[in-house]
Image (spheres, rainbow, N blue to C red):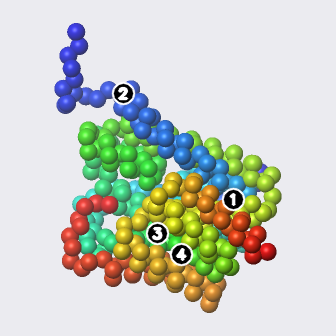
Amino acid sequence: MSIDPTTLAAILAMAAVTYLTRIAGIFLVGRLALSGRAKAAFDAIPPAVLVSVIAPTALATGWPETLAAFAAAAVATRLPLLATMAVGVASVVLLRMLAG
Amino acid sequence: MNKPLAPSAPLDMPRERAAGVRDIMPVMVAAAPIGLLFGALCAGKGLSPAEACLMSVLVFAGGAQFAALELWTWPVPVATLVFSTLLINARHILMGASLAPKMRSFSLGQKLAGFYFLTDESWALAERRAKEQPLTPAYWFAVAGLLPLSWVGSTVAGAILGSFLGDPSRIGADFAFTALFIGLVAGFWNGRVSAAAIGASAAASAAIYLAFGPPWHVAAGALSGIAAAYVAAPAGTNAAEAA
């Protein structure tokens, strides 16, 4: 059960920026009224980052991963999170078997 | 005989706390399997249970933690991890700015301590409650402060169990991230604008990954998606409603 110094540094830095985002709003009250296109751009940050992180696996690994990603996306707005994951994981296992 | 409480009567702490516990319980149950998965994937990436536990305690932000793990390589790319964390958690800034004015009975210290526990879920519950009655510290600390018990506990359990599971790709667990993220992205779906953002991010990220390799695909994909949302959104509409 060891803690690597670089891992510790990464976790502490991640924790620091996360806490700053959490408390920043307290000091920005009344000064942060985004609207229109600026608001749309700000709202798009979380999905844009999440998609960017997984795009290499989903689109640039192989056809089983790509098809499984589309299968998960097809059910994602209707099913709960864990069910969406189950569909994606089961699809990739089956498709990888087909791909040999 | 007790007189019924007037709406302006001081709210009693035990009742506020009980309401918070009642509201957060289903979220704690839902978070446990996600925490188990996070812990198990930490083990698969070579992080020790102590390191996984530390991350869940100190960062306590599921989306950013999963993204960090997906980007995790040895040696650890600290700058990439911090950049990704900042981008994913930037939404907290708007959430906090929206919630803080509704915390009139909180001292500054209570706000600073209370926002350590700010999550999408506790924020949504608190915003909903603030529509009907004043937000109290007793309610907030029950709602927001209990969730880490479930998240951290299940992370540690997953990290310990995960080290016995072996190669995660054997059972498709390596794809669990991708499927999880697709599910999380669906939570941000709002039609045409999000479709533009998602399409632009996916295309730019995959193209940059193939051309230059990690970590540049994250920044390129994120910026492309944000730009696409800006362009796709109708100009001049005044949606000043806080997120």
Q: Nearer the viewer, residue B28 or A97?
A: A97
| Image coordinates for residue A33, horizontal then vertical, percent | 25, 65
What number of labels is visible? 4
For mark 3, name the chain: A
The residue under label 1 is B41
The residue under label 2 is B15
Q: Secondary structure at mark 4?
A: helix
Query: Which mark identifies residue A47?
Result: 3
Contact flag, marks 1 and 4 (Cβ < 8 Å): no
Q: CA separation, marks 1 and 2?
A: 39 Å
Q: What residue type is disc 1 on?
A: Leu
Q: What residue type is disc 4 on?
A: Ser
Q: Nearer the viewer, residue B56 or B190?
A: B190
For mark 1, name the chain: B
Query: Which mark identifies residue A52?
Result: 4
Dividing the picture into quadrants, the one containing residue B17 is top left
Q: What residue type is disc 2 on?
A: Arg
Is A64 displayed left or right of B23 in the figure?
right
Q: What residue type is disc 3 on?
A: Pro
Q: Residues within 10 Å of mark 1 (few under 14, many from 20)?
A: many
